[in-house]
Amino acid sequence: MSAFNGQSNSQLILALSKGRIFEDTLPLLEAAGITVTENPETSRKLILGTNDPNVRVIIVRATDVPTYVQHGAADFGVAGKDVLLEHGGEGLYQPIDLNIAACRMSVAVKNGFDYETAVRQGARLRVATKFVQTAREHFAAKGVHVDLIKLYGSMELAPLVGLSDAIVDVVSTGNTLRANDLVEVEAIMPISSRLIVNQAALKLKRERLQPIIEAFERASQSKSQ
Ligand code: ATP
Ligand code: PRP
């Protein structure tokens, strides 16, 4: 299957989300000699051109990046480990950790809620999160019974209005938790973004993709040193 049906094997489609992933991927693209010629923050266009007529960037929701790449609508993309764990990774080759959009997945509760005691006493916890797979696995491994409440954003609100006892969300500076009188009680795992490649595209377009993958790898390694 090739991205944008009917296009030749020299055409490449990269799926990115607006915001931090787009911004942090730009220097990696530059290292591969690719410059995006339009700004998704000011343009309403969802297909962006680059200095290479054979490379285009599509702008999708962060959680949708693996879906576009899995189905071959994009040849490759950049997605957070958080998003990839929820998606499952089917049909995706994940060659590199790009060390961008770094944060951690954590459990947080309202200041004053005694999480340790609740866990020790075997209380059934209500946990609100966008990351239900990750949360389910985390609490199952600890032997903690939870009722998971699926949300799509603003998780920090849930304990404040009594929707949940705890949340599972990504934390970076901790500013959002502090601003909402929440405290981090458990770090689940470190998170960063990965390059993902459609498995069929990797075979059919290897000649075009390999130099870009290698440039991304070199640039992300030099950044993390
Ligand atoms: P969607 O738009 O689909 O709801 P989103 O709002 O989580 O997704 P972004 O905020 O752009 O999308 O986050 C993209 C990725 O960046 C996340 O999947 C995560 O890996 C990482 N990330 C999220 N929040 C932070 C943060 N505060 N600091 C650093 N990285 C983060
Ligand atoms: C993410 C996440 C937290 C916040 C954590 O939100 O959902 O709310 O970052 O970062 P901090 O620890 O540095 O405060 P984001 O900024 O992506 O907003 P969004 O969820 O509305 O996209």
Image (cartoon, rainbow, N blue to C red):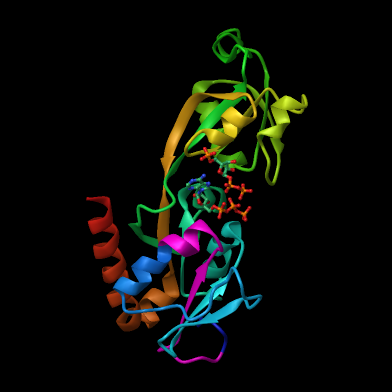
Task: Determine which quarter of the picture holds residue 134.
Answer: top right
Task: Determine which quarter of the picture holds residue 175.
Answer: top right
Residue 212, percent from left and from top: 32, 74
Q: Is residue 122 above or below residue 179?
A: above
Q: Which residue occupies the foreground of this view, 219 or 88?
A: 219
Residue at position x 44%, y 90% in the image: 53
Residue at position x 63%, y 78% in the image: 45
Task: Determine which quarter of the picture holds residue 125.
Answer: top right
Q: Is residue 27 above or below residue 194?
A: below
Residue at position x 47%, y 75% in the image: 75
Q: Which residue occupies the foreground of this view, 220 or 91?
A: 220
Q: Is residue 18 magenta?
A: yes
Q: Is residue 166 above or below residue 8?
A: above
The residue range painted magenta reads 6-24
Task: Give the left or right position of residue 12, taking residue 28 as reference.
Answer: right
Task: Give the left or right position of residue 80, taking residue 166 as reference.
Answer: left
Residue 102, percent from left and from top: 42, 46
Q: Is residue 158 magenta?
A: no
Q: Is residue 33 visible?
A: yes
Residue 48, percent from left and from top: 54, 80
Task: Give the left or right position of residue 127, taking residue 189 as reference.
Answer: right
Residue at position x 47%, y 32% in the image: 188
Q: Is residue 123 above or below residue 49?
A: above
Count numbered badges in the picture.
Answer: 0
Residue 127, percent from left and from top: 66, 29
Q: Is residue 91 visible?
A: no
